[in-house]
Amino acid sequence: MKDLVLSLWAYRHFLMNSIWNDFKSRFVRSRLGAAWIVFQPLSQVLIYAFILSNLLSAKVPGISNTYGYAIYLMSGLLAWNLFSEVLDRCIKVFVANANAIKKVNFPRVTLPIIEVGAAVTNNLILFAVMIVIFFVLGHPPGWSFLLILLMIPIIAMFAMGLGIFLGVVNVFIRDVEQVTPIVLQVLFWLTPIVYPANIIPEKFMQWMRLNPVYQFVDFYHQVIVQSLVPSFAGVLLVAAMGVAFSLFALVVFRRAGPDMVDVL
Amino acid sequence: MSIISVQNITKSFKTYKSEWHRVLGWMGVHVAPLIEKTILEDISFEVEPRQAIGLIGQNGAGKSTLLKIISGTMQANAGSVSLNGRVSALLELGMGFNPDMTGRANVWNTAGLMGFDKDQIENVMADIEAFAEIGSYFDEPIRTYSSGMQVRLAFSVATAFRPDILIVDEALSVGDAYFQHKSFARIREFQEQGTTLLLVSHDRASVASLCDRALLIHEGRVAKDGDPEEVLDFYNALVAAREGSKLEQIKGEDGRVRTISGTGEATIENIQLVDENDDDAESLLVGDKAAIIIDVAVKQPIPELVVGYMIKDRLGRAVFGTNSFHTKQILTDLKAGESYRYKFEFDVEIGHGNYSIQVALHQSDSHITKNYEWRDLALTFTVANTKYALFEGTSWIPPKLSIEPLKVKETN
């Protein structure tokens, strides 16, 4: 654990440079560059809002704003995007960097850290843009919004632990990479992001509370939509799971390390 | 103190019945692998600072695996490697470049992976660009590069900072002749400054010219460790060796090692170099007539016999070689007990210096198919030039020189 931290410290310049490169690479080949970080989730919001707002607008609780449903969607997607992007990047990272892993001797743990850093950067940009949009929609954010900055590392840690473990398995069983989008899609619809939680029948709600993604998406809803300071019980549990997953993933990563180079 | 110490390295690749068994293994539930293929077995050697070691061996012998373990990208199952210095490794023709990024961005990335910080990389960027000599391609994506250009860039990055240990796997054979010379020069310069070199190459000439020691890796073990010429001869014989074939190396009175190998159906009973009076000769003059006499005894019935020889210069480079296949004098259906005298008469049209003769008895055009007997350094002789005008080189190609004044053009 100690040499892990030391090697990350020794490679800090490389980490920063790589995260910056990941960000910069969006400008190199596409005309709109970083705008895509924002356009992709916002177009999703527009589509859902356009199709579903008439059906659901009345049912979003705790907000009187005309654009209540759009704000609800955006806050849920802000949390979901961070989770799914970190997870997806960590799952693909070892296979994608097979060449470097085989040919250069460097601390491999830097690879997922770069991916997490890049995903968090994207999420911060999205968050900043959303704040501007909330002002425009007449829903100015309160101080409780700062809680989102606390949530970002919690969600990232949770997704990273899960992602690194699946990423290591993916080196040996490539199906993982193929199955993930399907599982993510199911999970997306099983979580109240597009629809409000209150349309879920009470008998299913007890199961929903077991869904860690629900826990942090719900936290975002309360903070952003209702401008509340919610209970931390649920997200602390997610944070604890995140730490446990990450430690487990590191152990697996350590043990599988030698085998990984053999099959890449 | 040795700079590289390799102790009892063993490496095997495991294949599981299901990859899930491997996953279970990390969690502490061990399932025996279906196949465990051993690539390296109990390899140990020490390298002293400034030594240049050539690793040779057939494809799949485990050379690249060994280099990966030494450079740290791959882990051995058992044994240890200790290195006293910074390693720079050029493995499998590349540095793991990202094809979509430009050469410059890849240099940043790779040098970062190697552990250098921003200032250090900035300092050598111009050097790397200049050494690679790929012009405006330096700012183009790697996917537009030819393989030679990739190797140029990879070599430039790997050697941008002088390492204590430089590991090069095959890469030098890909570049063009110009870049090869340039990279050899840089390697020699590093050697003079104290860099230890570990090189894998199939090119006899680069091992012979860069290395002062060679290791032959055969079937996962160190089969031979010593002087490059001796190890290369042994390797050549090993390539030709088949089942039931013997292989021995004898140290001669002059201290040079002679390699004899072959299956023994036909053997060399006598080899002589004679002058035009059929007297044994060890020194010849340029322009003399001479002959190589080879007496062959057939020990077991063989379908075909070809006898060949090769004259080599003091560095082991081929000067001239031929055999009775090329002269269309193949003997067929030989019976045990027969014996033949081959006499190759030739004019000594080679320059002054020391030469050796290698002799081989085999089937068809080369010793690869069936090798009855092969002898390196079977004979040595010297050539002196006393009769003709002084010349340099191993080939005697006397010119007829004519000189005539050219008419100078009138300028007005």
Image (cartoon, coloured by chain):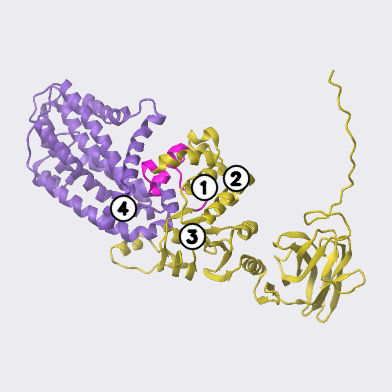
Which callout, 3 or 1, points at the residue further toward the start of the chain? 3
Q: What hue does chain B carry in this figure?
A: yellow
Looking at the rendered structure, whether the residues under marks 3 and 1 are on a common chain is answered as: yes
Front position in the image: A160 or B281: B281
Label 3 secondary element: helix
Residue position for label 2: B179
Element under disc 4: helix
Identify residue type, mark 4.
Answer: Ser
Distance from label 1 to label 2 (Cα)?
A: 10 Å
Pointer 1 chain: B
Q: Which residue is mark 1?
A: B155
On the image, the x and y values in percent for residue A150 come to 15, 40
Question: Label 3 vs label 2: CA separation?
Answer: 23 Å
Q: Which residue is mark 4?
A: A7
Q: Residues within 10 Å of mark 3 (few under 14, many from 20)?
A: many
* Chain ID, mark 4: A
| Residue underneath mark 3 | B67
Q: CA distance from mark 2 to mark 4?
A: 35 Å
Q: Are marks 1 and 2 on the same chain?
A: yes
Quadrant in the picture for residue B343: bottom right
Chain seen in purple: A
Evaluate whether residue A180 shows in this view.
no
Residue drawn at point x = 12 percent, y = 28 percent: A141
Camera-near label (3 vs 1) is: 1
